[in-house]
Amino acid sequence: MIRSLYTGASGLKNHQSKMDTVGNNIANVNTVGYKSTRTTFADILSQNIKGASAANGAVGSTNPTQIGLGTQIASTDLIFKDGAPMVTGKNTDLCLSGDGLFVVRGGNETYYTRDGAFDFDAAGNYVLPGSGHFVQGWMANNGVITTTSAIGDIKVSIGQPLVDATSLVTYIDNLNADMPTITGVSVDVDEPLTVGWGGKEVGIKGIPVNGKTWSFKEDVALGATIAQIVDSGGKVATVTLSPAAQFEIPKGTDVDFGTLYVLTKGSVTADYPVILKIDGKEYTALGMDKDMDLLKKWNLKTGGATTGSNTITITDGTNDITFTLNSPLEENLEKIQMTTATASEAKPVTLTFSDGTTVVKTDGTYTVGNSMPVETTTTVYDSSGVAYTVPLYFIREDSGNSDNKWLVSISPATAVTKGQTVTTEVTDANGKTTTVSFPVAEIQFDENGNMVTNSDIDTTGTLTLGGQNVTVDFTKLTQYPSEITVKSTSNGGIGGTLKDIQIDTSGVITGIYTNGIRRVEAQVALAHFSNSAGLFKTGTSLYQETANSGTPLTIKVGEFGTVLTPGALEMSNADLANEFADMIVTQRGFQSNAKTITVGDELIETAINMKR
């Protein structure tokens, strides 16, 4: 009989535990993301009075005789069904449905929760305000999110600057297939004569004689155009200064023929020779048939330099001058074809084009066979949001084979080659300068005006602004015999500050900036467990994994049936009606077990009274 008291006590204890569970569910009926629990009972091991027996010929089988010893709690189960969404209107609140949980971090520990009442703290961290746990997800890099990378704290600060550096420049529209190319370059000589043909040069310049040095015999006044020079042996020569002396030159100052542009004028003799540099070989002119004015433009006269000859003749178009050489020429030089020249105010360059037109230039470097540069500009934003206007020039090449090739450079000089790295400086609106470099690209078009793409031809280039690489895409260009309309577009934008954020149904956090730009900043990550009911409650609506929950799988919204509702919270899934029904059942069970103890006590009392 005493055994019945313990049986009833076990029932009281377990029903009390169940009542605790019911009370906890009711207490959390308004807890965000709360998942209700239930308590299930199981009987305790029974006392065996008699075992079961099998039938034989005379007697049938019998069941075992066992007396139960009470009840025990079998489990407290976590009910992970969804709670109803509750609209809050707060854009940082998130309501999660489906088989997933938010991931948060506190210290070195990772936790999981269905409580989406998140907010941004003063430092811009996305957190659970009640506990300060950091919400986990993927941060964007220049507006691009890589969800295959590791998750980390989400941080988006209101007022943060927009860093939208340019990464791509795209050129579109047309280059003129009939763009004229340079067929001739001529230079007015105002310094020691240098002319060239077929890539070879002829240079005429005064030099020190027999290893002697020259110095000015008398002081030279500012603006002087004539001066007397003397060598160490006392020989005197008259020279013309061109341009005129830019500063006063003291008597005895050494003569630098290359730097001061001191030009020999008068008759050439063995004492006062002139060097002619032909195809890398030097010839010494020991005499000349008449005086030469080196301020005029002199070219090699056609037929004026033949193989084996000891003379070479130059002309200014009207007058000819013949030099006597110290040794015969090694090759026949028939005509001048200057290939490259750099123009200046002091030395203008006359260009002749394939369409018969000519133009005089006072700046720039020009090469026969190439067109004048087609200038374009593009805007490039650096990593601080500062805008720079970068020039890019398109130069048509004419190899004589109708290759339809163009060089692309950041220099207007036409004397550039494919792969040559050209560097220049650009300035922003505030006067800040930075270095820009660009390896010269070579693009090509087919006979239909479409771009050729093969391993030998460039379709893109790389512009380097400071340490920032920008891809320049030429694939959308065409080459038709019509107007030049080439222009560029680029990504990136002017600086702004973050004024607001929005979160969409994918958990993507988008920043809204004062300059109107909307840029992806981060994305909220979720975790999926094979057995969410096996998670361990740690309080404050947080869970941790256990051996029975399985290892968490990091997922995005939409996977495993997960649905995200921004501006809302998940309500508790505790059902009051069910909880009240359970409470009544639990109450009756508790009362019944109490009655078991009372009756058992009365039976024991009766047995004791029998002795009286």
Image (cartoon, rainbow, N blue to C red):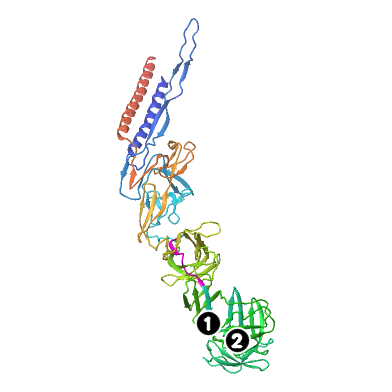
- Given this view, does label 1 or label 2 mark the residue nearer the observer? 2
| Residue 386 location, quadrant | bottom left
In this rendered view, identify the residue nearer to me: 38 or 218.
218
* Residue at image coords 53%, 76%: 185
In this rendered view, identify the residue nearer to me: 273 or 580.
273
Residue 266 in picture, x, y percent from top left: 60, 91
The residue tagged 2 is 321
Is residue 134 visible from the viewing direction of this image?
A: no
Element marked by disc 2: strand
Is residue 555 located in the magenta-colored stretch of the structure?
no
Q: From this view, report whether residue 158 is shown above or below residue 318.
A: above
Q: From this view, report whether residue 550 is shown above or below residue 152.
A: above
Q: Earlier in the sequence, mark 1 or mark 2?
A: 1
| Part of the protein shown in magenta | 169-182
The residue tagged 1 is 188
Left or right of 591 on screen, residue 474: right
